Image (spheres, rainbow, N blue to C red):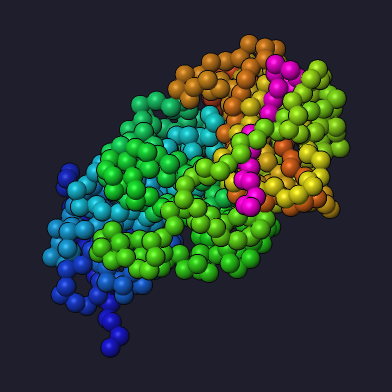
């Protein structure tokens, strides 16, 4: 006989301060006490995002009670929502409430993607006793560096589009019932969505005329560009030693939060609060961009049907993970600790660790005769260290920034599409330095974290440097793989900014994220260096003023060194071919 699933709507869940949050329960029509799978979301517990991360009916059919809750102040729940901050105590309270219900057996697991991963990790660092496992997907570990900022630069395209489309409108629709000013701001925000490109041009973001009612925390982010006490409390990576549960970490090579997914996996393996938490970490990374990766495309790149979560039945993998840790049921062989999709060869591969122990950390040095500007220049990339070579220079003008073309982006693809795209239009600019290897004699696999060590000077007291790793095929198609940025004032510390002395050479370390990709024989490995990636990141105005406070800009002359003693180089994790 087919199972019958009962859905109980708007169950009141009281928090410690008396605020009532609402949740829906999907449960088998049975008196049996079962484990609980919890999803806490700011996007609506009945919204379309829910079933596209994991179908709660399918989970209920696998003998789980599935509880889906609106976060504080969102949709059907009471209270005032403060992004990130609200999830600490509310997550703990909801886990413990669910464990005590008459339909529960006392064990709770959590699941969900993006901000629904935030709610999991922030609950987990509070160590609720009834929490036994978590399955965060496409999410971060540090909500300063890796969510709101990256390398000190504001993640403008993401922050503005996410707030404008997914956060502010719902709150304003609720607030307009008792606040007439919310009606006007709602109209402004909805109208601004169609004019998003125009709003991305705003430099003095602290003067932005919207979000005052609908998302006031947006201005908190701007007021705290450095890593300070505002961010420390919600820094998951700093509190891995409080987390006592296994985690199934799921990420994408083109996901905006890939770095956090990898940091959580590595950090929990070394610093988890229990031996079970340390040994119970799993990692799955596909060739996916942010959002709902159910297709085989990331940008313009087609990775084939085998790359999709549907083809590997990702939901079944997650349910098997929960079966193990909530029911002590081991289905089939012990799952691989790490499963990666290797782009280029377009296949899944199981590994035992991240980064891979057999990695050959190989340096590729920057070379030129002083004219690496654009793909038509003389920039080269090779394993040989430079001798006495002239530097490369370019003019970075904040009023004509190097545009974004793909990468890890969210949340409005009509304006800021993410994924893999041809970079040739970007590489035609004189303010982009391009360094390319000779055509490869044999294929080279690069799997792991990517880093650029750059020796450079600027005529400005503050500026940015960006880097991008690109695969160039025999026809010249240049596909972006991964990228990074460093804001010069944060070159030494995310907490204590220090301005530059114009003209002085500094060492910059640019975290370019990670990838798993095979460069085919005949292809070239390419590095792009520039000073903007706009609107993915805000433009640095080069003035050294307080960030986001005014619209003044100035151009900056940037000089990149590659000579003995100042040998700028790209460090790639090359994986030796198996014998």
Q: Is residue 206 above or below residue 157?
A: above
At 31% across and 75% down in the image, what residue appears? 61
Which quadrant would residue 499 be assigned to in this image? Answer: top right
Q: Is residue 233 above or below residue 448?
A: above
How many circles with numbers are drawn on the protein? 0
Q: Is residue 239 left or right of residue 450?
A: left
Q: Residue 502: give x, y in percent of width and height.
A: 67, 12
Q: Is residue 31 above or below residue 51?
A: below
Q: Is residue 522 above or below residue 31?
A: above
Tell me where the magenta segment starts and ends, as one range: 553-579
At 30% across and 37% down in the image, what residue appears? 241
One can see residue 177 in this view: no
Q: Is residue 87 left or right of residue 339?
A: left
Residue 572 belongs to the span the image colors magenta? yes
Front residue (pair 482, 350) = 350
Which quadrant would residue 324 be assigned to in this image? Answer: bottom left
At 36% across and 57% down in the image, what residue appears? 111
Q: Residue 492: give x, y in percent of width and height.
A: 52, 20
Which quadrant would residue 333 be assigned to in this image? Answer: bottom left
Direction front: furthest residue: 579
Magenta highlight: main SS = strand
Q: Residue 149: give x, y in percent of width and height.
A: 51, 34
Q: Is residue 128 left or right of residue 401?
A: left
One can see residue 93 in this view: yes
Q: Residue 322: give x, y in percent of width and height.
A: 32, 61
Q: Quadrant of the N terminus?
A: bottom left
At 61% across and 14% down in the image, what residue appears? 500
Front residue (pair 515, 176) = 515
Residue 251 belongs to the span the image colors magenta? no
């Amino acid at each position: 006989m087919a199972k019958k699933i009962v859905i109980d709507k708007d169950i009141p869940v009281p928090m410690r301060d008396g605020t009532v949050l609402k949740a829906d329960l999907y449960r088998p029509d049975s008196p049996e006490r079962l484990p609980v799978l919890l999803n806490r979301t700011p996007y609506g517990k009945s919204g379309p995002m829910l079933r596209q991360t994991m179908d709660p009916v399918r989970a209920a059919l696998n003998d789980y009670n599935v509880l889906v809750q609106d976060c504080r102040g969102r949709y059907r729940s009471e209270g005032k929502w403060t992004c990130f901050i609200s999830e600490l105590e509310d997550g703990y309270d909801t886990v413990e409430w669910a464990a005590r219900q008459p339909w529960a057996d006392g064990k709770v697991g959590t699941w969900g993607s993006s901000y629904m991963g935030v709610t999991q990790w922030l609950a987990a660092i509070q160590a609720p006793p009834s929490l036994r496992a978590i399955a965060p997907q496409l999410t971060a570990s540090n909500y300063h560096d890796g969510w709101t900022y990256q390398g000190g630069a504001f993640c403008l395209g993401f922050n503005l589009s996410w707030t404008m489309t997914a956060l502010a409108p719902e709150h304003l629709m609720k607030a307009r019932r008792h606040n007439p000013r919310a009606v006007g701001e709602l109209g402004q925000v909805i109208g601004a969505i169609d004019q998003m490109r125009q709003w991305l041009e705003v430099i003095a973001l602290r003067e932005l005329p919207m979000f005052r009612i609908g998302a006031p925390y947006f201005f908190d982010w701007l007021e705290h560009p450095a890593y300070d006490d505002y961010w420390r409390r919600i820094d998951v990576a700093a509190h891995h030693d409080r987390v006592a549960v296994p985690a199934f970490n799921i990420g994408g090579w083109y996901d905006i939060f890939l770095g956090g997914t990898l940091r959580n996996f590595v950090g929990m393996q070394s610093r988890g609060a229990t031996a079970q938490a340390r040994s119970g970490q799993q990692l799955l990374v596909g060739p996916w961009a942010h959002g709902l990766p159910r297709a085989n495309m990331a940008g313009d790149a087609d990775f084939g049907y085998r790359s999709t979560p549907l083809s590997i039945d990702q939901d079944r993998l997650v349910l098997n993970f929960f079966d193990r840790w909530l029911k002590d049921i081991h289905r089939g062989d012990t799952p691989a600790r790490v499963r990666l999709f290797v782009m280029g060869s377009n296949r899944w591969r199981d590994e035992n660790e991240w980064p891979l122990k057999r990695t050959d950390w190989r340096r590729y040095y920057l070379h030129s005769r002083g004219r690496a500007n654009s793909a038509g220049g003389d920039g080269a990339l090779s394993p040989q260290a430079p001798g006495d070579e002239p530097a490369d220079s370019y003019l970075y003008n904040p009023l004509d920034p190097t545009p974004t073309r793909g990468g890890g982006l969210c949340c409005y693809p009509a304006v800021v599409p993410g994924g893999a795209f041809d970079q040739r239009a970007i590489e035609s600019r004189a303010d982009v330095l391009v360094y390319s290897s000779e055509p490869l004699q044999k294929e080279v696999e690069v799997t792991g974290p990517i880093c650029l060590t750059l020796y450079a000077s600027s005529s400005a007291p503050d500026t940015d440097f960006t880097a991008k790793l690109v695969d160039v095929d025999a026809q010249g198609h240049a596909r972006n793989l991964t990228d990074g940025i460093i804001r010069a004032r944060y070159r030494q510390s995310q907490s204590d900014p220090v301005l530059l002395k114009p003209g002085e050479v500094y060492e910059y370390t640019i975290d370019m994220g990670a990838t798993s990709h095979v460069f085919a024989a005949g292809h070239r490995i390419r590095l792009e260096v520039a000073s903007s990636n706009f609107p993915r990141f805000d433009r640095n105005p080069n003035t050294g003023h307080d960030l986001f406070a005014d619209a003044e800009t100035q151009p900056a002359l940037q000089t990149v060194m590659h000579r003995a003693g100042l040998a700028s180089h790209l460090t790639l994790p090359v994986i030796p071919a198996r014998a």
